[in-house]
Amino acid sequence: MEKKRFKRWNLPKIKEGKLTQWNWVVQNVQNLSLGKNTDIGAFTYINAQNGVVIEDDVQIGSHCSIYSISTIDNKKGKVVLKKGCKIGTHSTIMPGVTVGENAIVGAHSFVKKSVPGHTLVAGCPAKPGKRFNGNSESK
């Protein structure tokens, strides 16, 4: 992620169930850990009841949903978004999922299983695509 862009980055003010100044919302704020230089798109919803950890340099597109609890299938568990990962717009991350360091989740994906670092996943449900390391790609 471009460091200049975040030269003046400050931890956002997050109030329970209220939109931030960038129009995203968190429930159970006390269970959210937010790293530095994060970029969370408008209209993203984060339910941190069982813990959500967003590490440094994570990008989350607009209209995403991150759930540490699901009342539909009674699943619960901490969600961890590792350093430098990117979550594409309109994606959903389900309870207990870890998205690995520098991994990429394609737009409109439904992620119900953990994603290894340096891996591209996409789809509904999200399935692994390419693995990559830095600027070079490999299958």
Image (cartoon, rainbow, N blue to C red):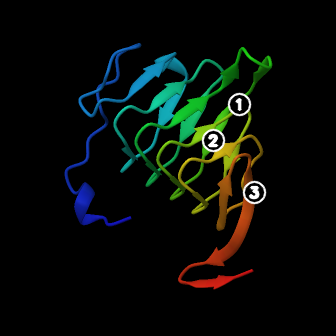
Find the distance from the CA under tag 3 to the CA under tag 1: 17 Å
Q: Estimate the x, y position of residue 27 in percent, counting from the top left.
A: 49, 17
Q: Secondary structure at mark 2?
A: strand
Residue at the image position 70 percent from the left and 20 percent from the top: 70
The N terminus: image quadrant: bottom left
Name the residue carrying label 3: 127
Say whether marks 2 and 1 touch (CB < 8 Å).
no
Q: Earlier in the sequence, mark 2 or mark 1?
A: 2
Q: Estimate the x, y position of residue 94 in percent, counting from the top left.
A: 68, 34
**Total marks placed:** 3
Find the distance from the CA under tag 2 to the CA under tag 3: 18 Å
Name the residue carrying label 2: 80
Q: For this view, does 69 lie left or right of residue 6? A: right
Q: Secondary structure at mark 3?
A: strand
The C terminus: image quadrant: bottom right
Identify residue type, mark 2: Val
Up the image or down, 81 lies above or below 103; here it is above
Q: Quadrant of residue 24?
A: top left
Up the image or down, 76 lies above or below 139; here it is above
Name the residue carrying label 1: 95
Mark 2 or 1: in front is 1
